[in-house]
Amino acid sequence: MTTTTFTKSVRRTTIALLAAATLTALPLTGAGAGGGAGATAVATEQRHDGTWHDGTWRGAWATSPQYPTAPFGPNWSQQGFSNHTVRQVVRVTTGGTRARIELSNRYGTKPLRITGATVARTDKDASVKAGSVRQLSFGKGRSVTIPAGASTYSDGVPFTVGALESLTVTLYLAEETGPATFHTFSSATSYRADGDHRSDRDGTAFTEAGDSWYYLSGVEVSGGQAPRRDGVVTFGDSITDGVGSGPNANNRYPDELAERFAAAGKPRGVVNHGIAGNQVTNDWAWAGEKGVERFKKDVLTEPNVRTVIVLEGINDIGGSGRSAPGQPTTPEVSVEQIVEGHRELIRQAHAKGIRIVGATLTPIKGSFYDTPANEAKRDAVNHWIRTSGAYDAVVDFDRVVADPADPDRMLPAYDSGDHLHPGDAGYRAMAQALDLDTL
């Protein structure tokens, strides 16, 4: 099945429509037993413990796993893979001399076997640079089985990489995977080929393309500098995820923030844990577990994090009390519930010694979410973020991207076109508003 390419405007509209329409419970999966023979390792739930994270690893790129679904049209998550090679391009935010990847089967219904994997330097599209392909191992074997509900790391491989360099991760999936844990909105092209092409330099075998990430949930680096706790995690919904930014351009606001660190001569790991449509208070089958739950899995498990930036709540507001044909009505979410959700995120961060920065919710006037009641809620939540003192620091994204002549509306130059999501210029302005010393 070839993934259909949708225009950015259609995808943004669909995100808004779905976020205001459908609430369903997320299926629960447990860690099942998985196995393999010979050189096949078996992954366990030992993520980010003292063995796996000895203080030397730094998050260089990340994305949040999601349940298999197709809210924007066809993708490969629900069907999964069988004798396929999947090639995915990511840009790391900090460099090192060793690298490893994280793979997630969080929402799989059965053990996932990765037959083999490679990392290489990106050339163009699905091709990689000659001589750069490195085979990855898992517990010294080339294959690994990841139980349902679990994730694993590859072994570290010598691989010198610089900040803001693009890497290509290739997975060969020989056996039928079943529905695939993935990340819906990537703003980046992924590629698929029939058969085993994990070591190919050119991309001619990769005849199918899509715009989601599959199984790959992190890239970490070590070496190249003395270990220090300086990582930044950006946490939120579609505006953190980068909806409205240009494809394959790395213009999401976290990307722009990483570029600022690099330009200052002090590159730091900036990882993106935004999910389009995500809420603080409610689970969404197509948009991830509620923020207060997934924060534990997505943020608190990242290595050497100093600061997290939270920008979330607009979908709680816009989705309140909405319903769609054949779907249950979304619960009404009050300002008090959103505030309590933010307080819970603050408690979780502080319990791990992580600094937490609150971001105000950006304008919605003219968007699908625009109603007097929703605007009143947004104003109230923003007032609390600005004045409560609950966060260690505040970044006022609302005022950064607002039109001075109409502060409830996004400045046209910053608007992607749907009056809800910024475009590239808006995301750049958001990143510029962040105080690097505060982070």
Image (cartoon, helix red, strand yellow):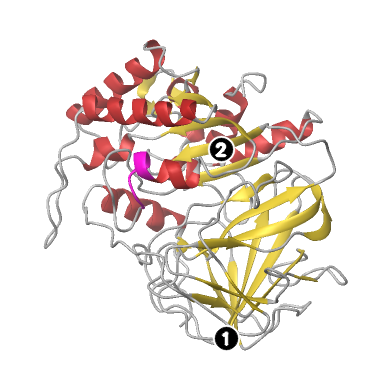
Which image quadrant for residue 80?
A: bottom left
- Residue nearest the observer in this picture, 394 or 97: 97
Label 1 close to label 2 by CB (< 8 Å): no
The residue tagged 2 is: 233
N-terminal of the pair, mark 1 or mark 2, is 1
Disc 2 residue type (three-letter): Val
Q: Secondary structure at mark 1?
A: loop
- Look at the image and say whether residue 289 sits in the magenta stretch: yes
Disc 1 residue type (three-letter): Ala
Q: Secondary structure at mark 2?
A: strand
Name the side, left or right, on which 46 lies relative to 181.
right
Residue 171 in sight in this render: yes
Q: Position of residue 198 (x, y in %)?
A: 70, 78
Which image quadrant for residue 391?
A: top left
- Residue nearest the observer in this picture, 179 or 361: 179
* Residue 35 to residue 418: above or below: below
- Look at the image and say whether residue 430 sits in the magenta stretch: no
Q: Dot 2, how many residues are within 10 Å of its Cα: few (below 14), some (14-19), or many (20+)? A: many
Looking at the image, which residue is at 67% across and 19% down?
437
Please provide the residue range marked out in magenta. Answer: 288-293
Name the side, left or right, on which 406 lies relative to 50.
left
* Residue 121 to residue 368: above or below: below
The residue tagged 1 is: 174
Residue 244 in sight in this render: no
The Cα–Cα distance between marks 1 and 2, rounded to whole angstroms, is: 34 Å
Which label was assigned to residue 154?
none
